[in-house]
Image: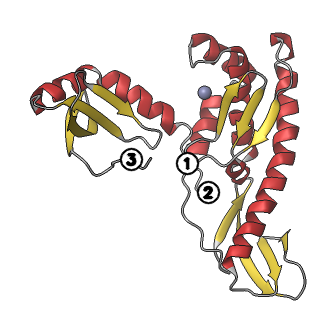
Amino acid sequence: MKPKADRGDIRRVAYGSRTVEYRLVFERRRQLRIDVHPDRRVVVHAPAGKAAADVDARVTRRAAWVLRQVAHFEQFQPLPPPKRYVSGESHHYLGRQYRLKITARPGPPEVRLIGRYFHVFLPHPRDTKTIAERVELWYRRHARAIFAQYTARCVAKLKTEGIVAPEVKTRRMPHRWGSYTRPGTIVLNPELAKAPLACIEYVIMHELCHLKHPDHGRQFHRLLTRCLPDWEKRKARLELATL
Ligand SMILES: [Zn+2]
């Protein structure tokens, strides 16, 4: 179902030096509900007839929790500017910037990384749909190889924790770099192949630590810090990476 994103008013409440911005939606319900969405939108569903000032007060009381949720989603927020797949456009791989170069050539399409260029050879250079598909396929294939290599490396560091190599799946996720869904499996976003290797290693280690500690509690962070002491630096770098 499509979210009813336009309903309600935008309101703001101050919390210390920070501001919580939320969309207030009145509806027939008994309890007030605060939702923080993966794209960091905050939506408050309030019982019809409740005073907006009362809702503000409730949001202010829950502000620490709301900001924590927002921060949680921020840590895995990829920034995907829509690509046009035309010559000259920049595309990243392992933290380095490459330029797309489309060349007309008969025969099956081919993608090759040569020097600072992402070369795409195909019969019709304006066929952006095929270019996009081929480039995505290229990323996915390379992502899989890198993820396998770094997962093995990280698992070796976690050996004493009794963590065994999980199944690694790749899936495009609009708001996540990685996720831990069920025991023995981690899912990684192939878009991550655009980030520096240090950041890729951080995301993999983060997800592997979830195999032992499913939440982001103190034990989770202790384990992560022991395996990857500079994880915070890597996380910050990932957030700044323009992919
Ligand atoms: Zn996590």
- Cβ of disc 2 within 8 Å of ligand 1? no
Amino acid at dot 2:
Leu
Cα gap from disc 2 to disc 3, whole angstroms: 27 Å
Q: Residue at x 81, y 61 (%)?
A: 138
Q: Report which residue position mark 3 lands on.
A: 3
Label count reads 3
Q: Position of residue 110 (x, y in %)?
A: 86, 74
Q: Is residue 18 above or below residue 57?
A: below
Left or right for 64, reference 100: left
Q: Is residue 230 visible?
A: no
Q: Residue at x 73, y 75 (%)?
A: 130
Front one among 202 and 82:
82
Label drawn at residue 243: 2
Q: Residue at x 45, y 32 (%)?
A: 71
> Which circle's residue, 2 or 3, is located before the other in the chain?
3
Amino acid at dot 1:
Leu
Q: Can you say which quadrant of the picture contains the C terminus?
A: bottom right
Find numbered disc 2 in the image and state the secondary structure of the residue it sits on: loop
Q: Regarding ligand 1, which quadrant of the image does it lie in?
A: top right
Label drawn at residue 240: 1
Cα gap from disc 3 to disc 1, whole angstroms: 29 Å
Find numbered disc 3 in the image and state the secondary structure of the residue it sits on: loop
| Colour style of the rendered protein structure | secondary structure
Front one among 109 and 76:
109
Cα gap from disc 1 to disc 2, whole angstroms: 9 Å
Quarter of image, res 135? bottom right
Front one among 214 and 6:
6
Q: Position of residue 66 (x, y in %)?
A: 36, 28
Crowding at dot 1, Cα within 10 Å, few <14 / some 14-19 / many 20+, comes out as: few
- Cβ of disc 1 within 8 Å of ligand 1? no
